[in-house]
Amino acid sequence: MLRHFDKPLFIAVIILCGIGIAMTYSATITTIDLADYWQRQLLFTLLGAIALVTAALFDYRHLELLAQPSYFVLLASLAAVYLFGEVKGGARRWLDLGPTDVQPTEFGKFLLIVFFAWYLSRFQERIRSLPYLLGAAVLVLVPLGLVYVQPDLGMTVTLAFISGTLILINGVRLLHVLLVAFAVTAVPVWLAIQGTLQNYVQDYMVERIAIFLDPASNPDAAFNVQQALISIGNGGWIGMGWGEGSQNQLHFLRVRHTDFIFSVIAEELGYLGAVLIMGLLFFVIWRLIRIADLAQDQFGRLITLGVAALIFFQTFVNVGMNLAIMPVTGMTLPFLSYGGSSLVSMMVAVGLAQSVVMRHRKMDFS
Amino acid sequence: MNERATRTATSTSIIVRLTLLATFIVFCVRLYGLQIVRGANYQEQAAVNRLRTIDLYAPRGVIYDRNGEILARNRPSFVITVIPADLPPNDITTPVNEQRIALERLLAALGADTDPEIAIRIAEVMFLHLGREDFKDTVGTAGITLEFRLVNLETLQINDEGREILVEVPTLIPDLSDPLPAAGLLALLERAVALGSQGSSYKPVSILDLVDREQAFRVAEQTYQLPGVHVLQKPVREYPFRELAGHVLGFLGPIPKLAAEDYKAGGYDNPNESVGLNGLEYTYQDALRGQPGRRIIEVDILGRESRSVSTERESEPGLNLHLSLDIHLQQVMHDALARQLEKTGAPHGVALAMDPRDGAMLGLVSLPSYDNNIFSEGLGEEYQALEVEDDTRRPLYNYAIGGLYPPGSTFKLVTATGALAERVVDPYTVLVDRGPIYLPNFFFPDDPEQAQAFVSWNHKLNILHGSMTIVEGIGLSNDIFFYYLGGGYPNFMTGLGSERLAKWMRLYGFGELTGIDLPGEVRAFVPDEQWKRLTKAERWTTGDSYNMAIGQGDVLGTPLQVLVSTAAVANGGYVVKPQFVREMFDTQGNLQWQYEPVLQERIPVEPGLLAVVQRGMWHAVNGPAGTSGNSRVEGVTVAGKTGTAEFCAWDAEIQDCKDRDHEGNLPFHAWYTAYAPYDNPEIAVTVFVYSGGEGSTTAIPVAQETLNAYFHGTGDTAP
């Protein structure tokens, strides 16, 4: 069983985490309040590695039993947030659990992946008929609606992307896809005609889109993006060297250890370093798709693809934002951005995929 | 899994992998575009972000007197500035104004809310930045009404003849003597920052200057919490002898708006740079200033310096000036003149001392004077005008070079030289003072009642000088003698007449600037026939020649011109250019510049004849009944000439000259001009007291004390 543990995947993840620690060090060491962040990130990496191995040893097939409860846990926690949640920065996203605040959606991603993988694999054949597809749509729209009203557009889109990917990969009729696509576009248009669209769209979302389309409308956010571009361009072929990026070290680049860690990489390690690290990230996703192909059952396949979709989506949105081809969202770069819960949950996700690949032979006598 | 499902799985897997690959390639291409294709452009922007060019202060040159006493130096002082680009920008998505909060915090850190002195000074600095109109408007928008004062502002204009003249324009300026409320100060700061952001927003904008070391350090410690705030060193010019040499040294101030373009063309990039606005500080501005250096530093996003990258240009300290002025002699002259002004109640006066051999100025006093330290910390043109307004005697005016007065009998040196050189008389010619002489009226030559009387000063005292040669004529300052020299007398003798008087007046340097190294010198036209026809539409009469011969009528000159004419008599006929600065040294003590005395072509008079004029001046001091006996100095032979010049200060209200005495006589200026030693002159002195009365009583004591101090020491220095 251990023989099938995906070592290249594991090594790639550990290298990415190591680079994440190094870049966190570079991005925070000149700020007194953040000077110990690299040590914390190191600790999170160690915890994450343990969690990864633990998840790999755990047989993912037991999760099928937990699929339905996990959906209700997801709904319950979102409902709790809706009713009793903490408000931070104008959004109700946190639950106060004594010593620490928890953001249920961080783990909700996995609950949703597990539940959806179960639902789709359970009704894999029947999903081709419309009622089951609509059932899936309703099941996903309920938690999505609760996340949307928090409000958390980034997470809503992430969850929608993951669910959508899983449904598509599981197989649907082209006609149904067109129907859904029509509904998705028709509803906002209908609301717009009714003049009630703005009741459903949060102000800050409109603002973000507006800033993306016209950066001058918010000088502060435009400043961050502009500084990110300058940092990236400043790197050139081989970069200014680790700990030597002027945009990073002199703090022209803001939120540099989380949202804009990729700009720090591009500035200090240059084009070659940035492409290499991007290559590592895509290699991780590639290996996950390989695992999905090897999976012995549809449940394992969908879980792995859900994880791959999650990592791909976050990478795509974060790097896209750094490269100014996507609007600004607070989405982190997997394995590289500073942050404990994001890192640990990503490693658990990779551990689940390892669990799938380790058990991909139905009979294993070794 | 059935076969169809497997096929589907394989094809989706391929699609997914292709999507992945495509995304990766798109990102790589985009990254290539940013980092490689447009890399140079972004690297330049990154350099703009982090690199700042800062001016390195070049210490202004020190000014020394002839004995090495420091007359002008630099006192350390600090300025609190903000760099607009480094202030937190106002985030429009938040209800609060971040920039305003930062400025409020700065005001609190400076203590503007608790210390009225600081609040006043901040307002003054803002006034300098914004100018009158903008200051008024900005404070107005904050809902605060200002008190105003009316001053007459001198502005340079071009008159009809195309010459520059000073015109007084009544102007309202805000009264800054009370502290503004915090809202007003905040509005001013915001306005100054907004203006600063328009140009190069990395240029520091001064908020508070004249900050002492202690307070500067206190603010510097807080700059961690005050992004964009910088403490810069900016020394203040200090004049230890205060008003003693105010007119010689001048003062500094911000570049005047009228001349801003000229200064910019001359390499003065900062419009608020302090430059010499008067005196030697003005004349030698470029030498004293040196060259400010330039350094490139790296700053972080808060604008704090992280390291110095390179020095683009070293700053070059200004040159030190060494003057011929003797500050202790200046002190004696100042005190003596001040005493005489007090005694006579005269509004102003001048005392001058110069080495007649090369024009080296030993002293220049123009009273009232001013403490030039006030202007180093001052508020620029408008508030200088305020100072002037407060003192009707106009202390900023340098009467020694800026005042034109009838030279009176001191002009007889010119007339005498001309008459001898032109052979109107010879040294032995005897003329007789028999009392007033009468010129027949031009239109009624046969009516003695219409004849015009010309008297000599001694006639009023019932004294007749009788017969005399030119030596006694000068010594006694007999006017009748000089009337004959100037205008002759019908059927008796031919005088110099208008043209020759004007010629000799010009030869002695009247009508031209002396060329002293001080700004603001004026000159008068030499009156001659053509001048009179053009300006007064009258013909020149013998009476005009009479008046001109004794330095009255339309003859005008500055006290400095009288000094130069005296020096020309003393040095054997050379008109010299008066000069204060003898040498300039760099900070290493190397001589960089030395003054070469400028002697004009010798006045064309035989030395023997000029010696007669000298003898006349000797006679005035040392001869029997000489006018200037009181100017004798023990052990040294002095030669001198008094002057008592009638003048008319026309008052339009009473349609007459002001200050006539009870008999209707006009008031007099007191003059005395002298040199010593007689045989080998080292010093020439001229004293002038406006409306001072008799030259012999008012002006001579000042000259005597000056000469005495020069030859016998001031008590402070060896002779």
Image (spheres, grey):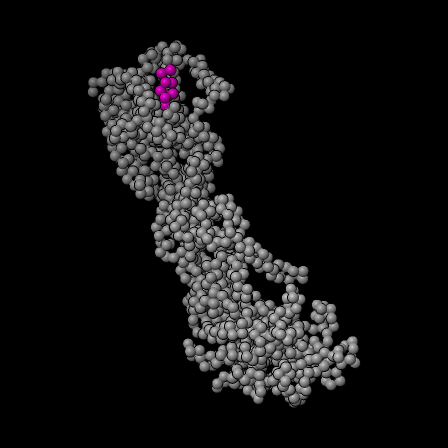
Q: Position of residue B645 (x, y in %)?
A: 61, 76
Q: Is residue B272 above or below residue A122?
A: below
Q: Position of residue B302 (x, y in %)?
A: 39, 45
Q: Position of residue B435 (x, y in %)?
A: 67, 85
Report if residue A132 is visible in the image: yes
Looking at the image, which residue sits at the far left? A366
Relative to residue B286, is residue A10 drawn left or right?
A: left
Which image quarter is the C terminus of chain B in?
Answer: bottom left
Q: Is residue B79 above or below residue B245?
A: above
Q: Is residue A150 above or below residue B644?
A: above
Q: Main secondary structure of the magenta part?
A: helix
Report if residue B364 is visible in the image: no
Which image quarter is the N terminus of chain B in?
Answer: top left
Tally of numbered discs = 0
Q: Residue at x 46, y 35 (%)?
A: A218
Relative to residue B411, is residue A183 drawn left or right?
A: left
Looking at the image, which residue sits at the far front? B662
User: Is residue A131 shown in magenta?
Assistant: no
Front position in the image: B436 or B85:
B436
Q: Residue at x 43, y 72 (%)?
A: B68
Front position in the image: B167 or A242:
B167
Q: Position of residue A306 (x, y in %)?
A: 34, 22
Q: Residue at x 36, y 45 (%)?
A: B225
Q: Residue at x 36, y 37 (%)?
A: A256
Front position in the image: B86 or B132:
B132
Tell me the magenta residue range: A138-147
Front position in the image: A81 or B631:
B631
